[in-house]
Amino acid sequence: MDKPAKPIRLMVSLLILKFLRNLSDENLVEHGAENIYFQYFSCEQFFQPNIPCVPTELIAFRQRIGEPGVELILQESIHIK
């Protein structure tokens, strides 16, 4: 049985942080467990001392949205209105 997908807000915020900080998927999830600012950006209400997801979930998310989806997220994250 497949696990349910993580919340879209979490996955998008992790993708943005990955590219902003130039982190590997493994380093990103480790930082997510230790960094309260990463967690706040990902809409956590309280500090969670565990990893937000496993690296393979990030890979699966990028595959689901494809390269155009990744580009759109990154473009929108820097878009100034």
Image (tube, rainbow, N blue to C red):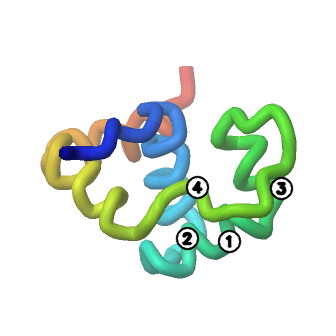
Q: Amino acid at mark 3?
A: Ile
Structural distance between the alpha carbons of marks 1 and 3? 9 Å
Q: Position of residue 51 (x, y in %)?
A: 62, 63
Q: Earlier in the sequence, mark 3 or mark 2?
A: 2
Q: Amino acid at mark 4?
A: Pro
Residue 76: which disc? none
Structural distance between the alpha carbons of marks 1 and 2? 5 Å
SS type, badge 2:
helix
Residue drawn at the location 78% of the way across and 61% of the way down: 49
Query: Which of the 4 image quarters holds residue 64?
Result: top left
Left or right of 77, for residue 41: right
Residue drawn at the location 51% of the way across and 32% of the way down: 9
- Figure quadrant of the C terminus: top right
- Figure quadrant of the N terminus: top left
Structural distance between the alpha carbons of marks 4 and 3? 12 Å
Q: Is 59 drawn above or below residue 39 in the view shown?
A: below
Q: Earlier in the sequence, mark 4 or mark 1?
A: 1
Residue 52: which disc? 4
Q: Is 8 drawn above or below residue 2 in the view shown?
A: above
Q: Which residue is mark 2?
A: 28
Residue drawn at the location 56% of the way across and 68% of the way down: 29
Structural distance between the alpha carbons of marks 3 and 2? 13 Å
CB of mark 1 within 8 Å of CB of mark 2? yes
Structural distance between the alpha carbons of marks 4 and 1? 9 Å
Residue 36: which disc? 3
Which callout, 4 or 1, points to the residue nearer the camera?
4
Q: Which residue is mark 1?
A: 31
